[in-house]
Amino acid sequence: MPRKVRGPDAALIASLRAGDESAFTSLVDMYSAAMLRLARMYVRTQAAAEDVVQEAWLGVLKGLDRFEGRSSLKTWIFRILTNLAKTRGERESRSVPFSSLGTDGEDGEGRAVDPDRFFPPGSESVGAWASPPTPWEDVPEERLLSHETQDFVAKTIEMLPEQQRTVITLRDVEGWSSEEVRNVLDITETNQRVLLHRARSKVRAALERYLDQGQTDG
Amino acid sequence: MARPLSCQEIVELVTDYIEGALPRRDRKRFEEHIAGCDGCRTYLAQMRTTIIRVGRLTEETIPPAARDKFLEVFRDWRTA
């Protein structure tokens, strides 16, 4: 007997269990793009990512009767996906398991802003901006919103350490809540926030350099 | 009275602030600093703009061949 599911996913689960293909199709269309992106962070090739997602969908269908709705359907699906992607990634020896994460993350220093931009210890205004940021209100909107700028942001994210890249992608690109990210990646709230902070700070800094350059270019 | 925060401290607290994760007392110290500091107000605005820019990156496309493969999973599962 399938377990009884309550909550917002109940109707969808009932349709899936009843073999309603259109319910499955809508689920595939809703989550597969994000699943592919997430899988791609653990495995080397797009083809491997597609395999992992396919395997995950099979896992979802096979597990339907066991699903109790204690987490959301979305969280459950993405947990199945990350477990499979991690296993596959470890076989390819690419991924660092999230559970091995220290608070210091992957890169040593991890300051949001270059310390040289603040007055140094010993000066009267220690820790105050020596070289404050310039407001982006002055940047022409078409430059801020241009494809070039978007590409630059995308490339910056690609170059982040894996854990930071995963967290900023899920939170800010996919728009997940911190709770969803925590549950799917199995990390603490603090780790989630530290990784997000590092990632966002680096993207901001890169964007600042990029936009400042444009100003001087004319 | 709590010691005022420096700009260098503010930039490390910005995510906690935006995420609503600062304890009330620190939130107050953060806001007191921001109110009197153009540089940090600009910094906070830039972080918010960054988040919005990053949010525009989503491409909602699934390669058609992959989509077909995923949908086939259902048919195989049902006939299994």
Image (cartoon, rainbow, N blue to C red):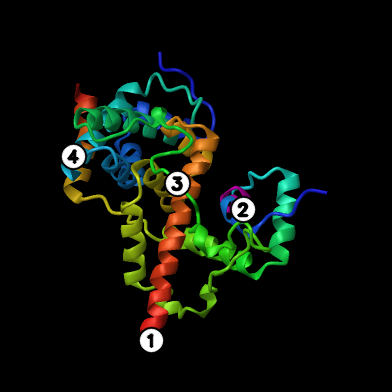
Which mark is on residue A109? 3
Q: Amino acid at mark 1?
A: Gly
Dot 3: within a 10 Å radius of its alpha carbon, few (fewer than 14), some, or many (20 or more) residues? few
Label 1 sits on residue: A218
Where are the magenta residues, as a range?
A: B13-17
The residues tagged by marks 4 and 3 sit, at their Cα atoms, a distance apart of 44 Å
Q: Amino acid at mark 4?
A: Lys
Badge nearest the viewer, 1 or 4: 1
The x and y percentages for residue B66 are 19, 44
**For residue A23, side relative to residue B32 (left or right):** left
Residue at 37% x, 61% y is: A153
Tell me if residue B73 is in the magenta stretch: no
User: Secondary structure of the magenta portion, mostly?
Assistant: helix
Q: Nearer the viewer, residue B6 or A152?
A: B6
Q: Are marks 3 and 1 in contact (CB under 8 Å)?
A: no
Q: Nearer the viewer, residue A130 or A27?
A: A130
Q: Are marks 2 and 1 on the same chain?
A: no
Q: Are marks 2 and 3 on the same chain?
A: no
The residues tagged by marks 3 and 1 sit, at their Cα atoms, a distance apart of 34 Å
Badge nearest the viewer, 4 or 2: 2
Label 2 sits on residue: B9
Label 4 sits on residue: B69
The residues tagged by marks 4 and 2 sit, at their Cα atoms, a distance apart of 50 Å
Q: Quadrant of residue A214?
A: bottom left
Is A39 placed above or below A88 here? below
The residues tagged by marks 2 and 3 sit, at their Cα atoms, a distance apart of 15 Å
Badge nearest the viewer, 3 or 1: 3
Q: How many marks?
A: 4
